[in-house]
Amino acid sequence: MGENTSRLEHEIRTERAELGRNLEDLEQKAKDLADWRVHYGRHPEVFLGLAAGAGLIAGVLASTGGSTAEAPVTAYPRESREHRPLLERSRKAAHLVETWGHISDALLGLATAKIVDSIADALPGFRDQYDNRVGSPVSR
């Protein structure tokens, strides 16, 4: 009888220890799910793409409400000598804003392509569904 009791106590202690380890593993997994650094460590390209996209969106939202390239440059009644430097600066600023718009569009397209590639690598069949929805295949 004493041998059975000690064997049962040993099994109970072993089960408790294993349950304790399982509980610690579950706690660690729950912490990892809530920690963005773990996800960044596993998928840095997605986070970099999201950061680039967020930066571009913030830049567009912070702009002056439209391209100055669309605004008429002939806001001055006459191109007198005193207005020429202002008019030239206005043209340069309009060109700069237009160029930045092209660059940001290209970067946004590149970030979108990288995000689609990352998702397609993780999810089988995603690329086919995406290509069917968009109508043109993304770079592979």
Image (cartoon, helix red, strand yellow):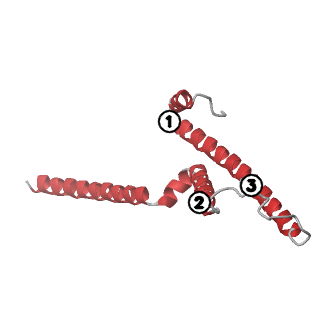
Within 10 Å of disc 2 (Cα), the crowding (few <14, some 14-19, many 20+) is: few
The residue at the point 22 percent across, 58 percent down is 13
Label 2 amino acid?
Leu
In the image, what residue type sits under mark 3?
Ala
Name the residue tied to disc 1: 123
Q: Which mark is residue 61?
A: 2
Mark 3 — residue?
Answer: 69
Question: Element under label 1?
Answer: loop
**Picture disc at residue 12:** none
Residue found 77% across the figure and 58% down from its top: 94
Q: Which residue in the rendered view is the most extreme toward the front?
A: 77
Label 2 or label 1, whichever comes before in sequence order: 2
Q: CA distance from mark 2 to mark 1?
A: 32 Å
Do callouts 3 and 2 mark residues in contact (Cβ within 8 Å)? no
The residue lying at 55 percent from left, 55 percent from top is 41
- Relative horizontal placement of residue 58, taking residue 100 as reference (left or right): left
Where residue 8 sits in the image (x, y, percent)?
16, 53
